[in-house]
Image (cartoon, grey):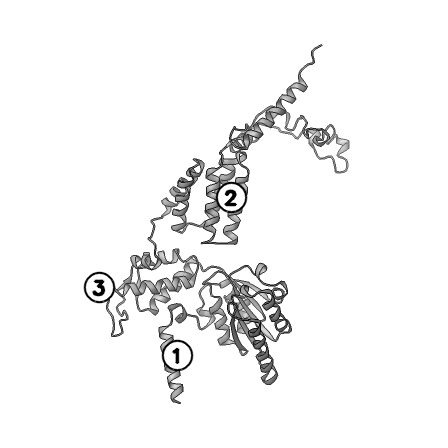
Amino acid sequence: MAEDLFAAAAEDRLTRQAPLAARLRPKSLDEIVGQDHLLGKGRPLRALIEADRLSSVILWGPPGTGKTSLSQLIANTTAKAFEQLSAVTATVKDVREVSARATDRLGQRGQGTILFLDEVHRFNKAQQDALLPSVESGLLVLIGATTENPYFEVNPPLLSRSTLFRLEPLSPDACAELARRGVTAEGAAIDDDALALLVERSNGDGRHVLTSLEVAVAIAHEHPDAVRDGTGRIVDESVRVRIDDIEAALGTKALRYGRDDHYDVISAFIKSIRGSDPDASLYWLARMLEAGEDARFIARRLVILASEDIGMADSLSLVVADAAARAVEFVGLPEAQLNLAHAVVHLASAPKSNRVTVALGKAVSDVRDVAGGEVPVHLRDGHYQGAKSLGHGQGYDYPHDHPEGWVDQQYRPAELEGRVYYEPSTHGAEERVRTRMAQRERTDADSTEPSQT
């Protein structure tokens, strides 16, 4: 009896001393912040949990999105036994022991077993193969949690026997709600600008919100006007967590970045790249990232710039910019900052040409201003029935039939023949394009010049 009392007291003390993120773990599905697409009323994962009919699942999402909290909530609501392993430390022997205990439970009490495997992507192929028979037979219901793409990190047989649920980064509103709960739990309050900075820098990571807030509250305890009880706990909510507390907790300063700054900074960023100044370009990139600018917005502007300001002078720039944009989606922040910086330096140091942009503008102007514009007969589609009787395609000279792979013929409506849109510059790779086009013009002139007799 005494041992039970001591154990209960120790558990209570540990609970009170636990990190804020642990103390605020949800005790019901309604307490979970975010992930409404999975856990809202009538959503699939919620329905499976409430009915205690969960089959093997992989929970895939960034850190701090609720994977562990969700698994512990399942442990508290299911009638099945709940086992937990970490793929960082577990071995094949551990997996076999869990399977053996699951077999005993099922045989003796008819009770199923759920295995929560954190960091499932850290399991190697042999470990995953050892787990597969128990999952395949239904002896174990697997809940695997991973921050990595399971299509790359989880063996296909194991993945095919599990339902994949994607957890998204928490929205700003969800992060703010989590922070308010944390402030209440800590017996303090928080200024609006401090809350905004905390949410802005969280990157959708709920654990980061609560960990940083806990540090900020500890700093706020040192305010000279703080009113505390006998344990040192703040009891007067007029003492608030301020923006300098959040800055100290995050190890960063708040940047002023309003609507005007959004447009001014991106303008300076683009003009610095266009002006071939990689250092200035990197500064403005860092300024935007530190202020919480949407990385996808930055990536989109780089893709546009690659064609608008570099174009044919370095066609690889479009490939680099597009790759950076894809990396932002695939990798996410903060790591994707490196991909953006890589693209920025490449684009800023690349030769520049706006001749593609100018050429398109001229072509669009003619499309709008010049009437007619019929497709020349020899360029029309001659494959459908009756096309040949209309003369479509007749007279078309196939360029690959010529040694040079090129032949001069009319490719535009007669009204626009001879109009020049694209004039290559002498910058970068576009110089080679300029030379090649000039050679074709000379060849064309020689072929049309009357012979001397």
Question: Disc 2 marks which residue?
Answer: 321
Q: Is 300 in front, or is 411?
A: 300
Pointer 1 residue = 11
Q: Amino acid at mark 2?
A: Ala
The quarter of the displayed image where residue 391 is located? top right
- The answer to whether residue 234 is above or below residue 168 is below
- Distance from disc 3 to disc 1, alpha carbons, whole Å, reads 33 Å
Residue 189 appears anywhere in the view: yes
Determine the residue positioned at 68% across, 19% down: 447
Residue 352 placed where, x, y %? 49, 34
Element carrying mark 3:
loop
Residue reaching furthest left? 224
| SS class, disc 2 | helix
The CA distance from mark 2 to mark 1 is 54 Å
Q: Which residue is mark 3?
A: 224
Looking at marks 2 and 1 on the same chain, the residue that comes earlier in the sequence is marked by: 1
